[in-house]
Amino acid sequence: MPKMKTKSAVKKRFKVTATGKVKVQAAGKRHGMIKRSNKFIRKARGTMVLSDPDTKIVKQFMPYSR
């Protein structure tokens, strides 16, 4: 059987931690910052871990991750 391909969009947007959790950049930080509150901008800094149902979906597109 040939190798399965990883979805290109997924490998650009997600990373898998050593324990198998999926890290993702916080949403809503690309443009339109003027209408967002300072609290929102602070909280959207850095990365966060996806919830379990979302992790299940993302891992379907990453066949060789843990």
Image: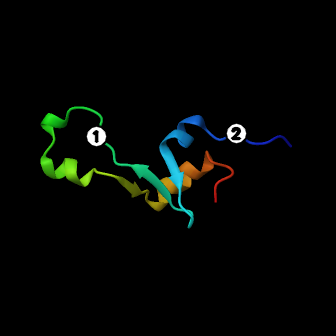
Residue 35: image quadrant is top left
Residue at label 1? 29
Find disc 2 in the rendering and name its residue.
5
Q: Is residue 48 left or right of residue 44?
A: right
From this view, report whether residue 18 is shown above or below residue 43. below
> Seen from this angle, which residue lies furthest top?
31
Examine the rendered structure and indicate whether residue 19 appears above or below residue 30.
Answer: below
The type of residue carrying mark 1 is: Lys
Q: Position of residue 27 (x, y in %)?
A: 33, 44
Q: Amino acid at mark 2?
A: Lys
Count of marks, rendered view:
2
x%, y% of residue 21? 51, 61
Residue at the image position 43 percent from the left and 50 percent from the top: 24
Q: Which numbered mark, 2 or 1, is in the foreground of this view?
A: 1
Q: At 64% from the left edge and 54% from the top edge, which residue is drawn?
A: 65
Going by the picture, which residue comes out furthest to the right?
Answer: 1
Q: What is the C-alpha distance between the residues marked 2 and 1?
A: 29 Å
Q: Residues within 10 Å of mark 1 (few under 14, many from 20)?
A: few
Q: Position of residue 41 (x, y in %)?
A: 21, 47
As drawn, is 24 to the left or to the right of 5?
left
The picture quadrant where one finds residue 31 is: top left
Q: Which mark is residue 16?
A: none
The C terminus appears in which quarter of the rendering? bottom right
> Looking at the image, which is closer to me, 4 or 45?
45
Q: Residues within 10 Å of mark 2 (few under 14, many from 20)?
A: few
Q: Quadrant of the N terminus?
A: top right
| Residue 62: % across, % down | 62, 48
Asked whether the residues under the numbered discs 2 and 1 touch, taking CB atoms below 8 Å apart as contact, a structural biologist would say: no
Give the residue at x 19% y 36%. Answer: 33
Residue drawn at the location 20% of the way across and 32% of the way down: 32
Mark nearer the N terminus (2 vs 1): 2
Which type of secondary structure does the marked residue at label 2 adopt? Answer: loop
